[in-house]
Amino acid sequence: MDPVRIAEAASLLAAARGASTRIDGLPEACRPKSAADAHAIQDAVTALLRDEVRAYKANAPVAGDPNSHGLRAPIYAANTRTSPARFPVSEAPQCGVEGEVAFRFRHDLPPRATSYTRDEVAAAVDACAAIEVVSSRYANPDAMSPQDKLADCISNGGFVFGASLADWRALDLSKLKVNLTVNSETVLEQIGGHPIGDPLGVAVAFVEMMRTAGGVSAGQFITCGSCTGLRYLKPDDTCGVHFDGLGAVELQFVP
């Protein structure tokens, strides 16, 4: 993708973030045609915002599909909070929430020629409960292509994390009981629910992506996919997510 077009797309998305506004879409000439294009736009947005990347969200490639590739998206420090959190609606007008298993890296995993193993990644992280806040810079995100959404950090609006658990490896992360409440009322209770049943596998795929793109820094988080589905709340609503054995996280959307 032409660097000039990448810069133009990034300017529009960064401006929408800064002003908490929504755009109809990117100009046709600036729309990404591939994951590589979309990741390049993300990186250009990051450069424009000049904000620390505190976390990432990621998807793992589909096993057995040679055309499937891992995807990642930065989450910025300005939109990251510790539970219990008060999250301004102005930062995430759609008030979307997803309960997730996340990991915090205890030490750097720097670039290197060989892949990191699953055991190496597991040994480098603590686990925690998290809520991904979902909000798009597009006025009608459902009408956008997957590449357009990826350029917009996969509709990430923010991230709230709970207490870290160092001794998590005895947990079966694919079968955790999860409870989601809205204003103290249970709206979801189930076992499992992760899209591929393997949150750690997403973290491993993410580390592999970053191994050739600057590596991972100590203190960064990776949030690994919704276990509760996407729910849209309202201003003043309080959302809580609790995973048995892992912990809890809470946020309130405030005007």
Image: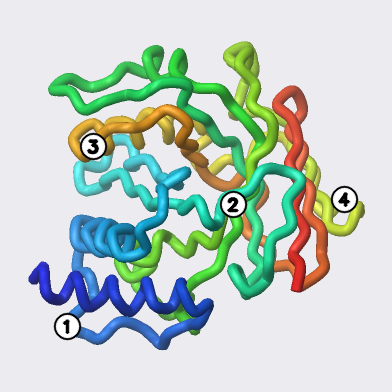
As rendered, which of 231 and 107 lies closer to the eye?
Answer: 107
Tag nearer the camera, 2 or 4: 2
Secondary element type, mark 3:
loop
N-term-proximal mark, 2 vs 1 = 1
Q: Return the residue at label 4.
A: 186
Q: Amino acid at mark 2?
A: Glu
N-term-proximal mark, 1 vs 4 = 1
As rendered, which of 144 and 246 lies closer to the eye?
Answer: 246
Tag nearer the camera, 3 or 2: 3
Q: Quadrant of residue 120?
A: top left
> What's the CA distance linking mark 2 and mark 4?
18 Å
Tag nearer the camera, 3 or 1: 3
Q: Return the residue at label 2.
A: 132
N-term-proximal mark, 3 vs 4 = 4
Residue 141, compared with residue 247, is above or below; it is below
* Residue 46 visible here: yes
As rendered, which of 21 and 48 lies closer to the eye?
Answer: 48
Q: Quadrant of residue 177?
A: top right
Q: Return the residue at label 1.
A: 29
Mark 1 burial class by Cα count in 10 Å: few <14, some 14-19, many 20+: few
In the drawing, what numbered circle is on residue 164? none
Mark 2 burial class by Cα count in 10 Å: few <14, some 14-19, many 20+: many
Name the side, left or right, on which 17 lies relative to 43. right
Residue 168, compared with residue 195, is above or below; it is above
As rendered, which of 100 and 22 lies closer to the eye?
Answer: 22
Which residue is found at the position 74% from the left and 23% from the top? 245
Which residue of the protein is positioned furthest toward the left in this rendering?
A: 2
Q: Return the residue at label 3.
A: 214
Tag nearer the camera, 1 or 4: 1
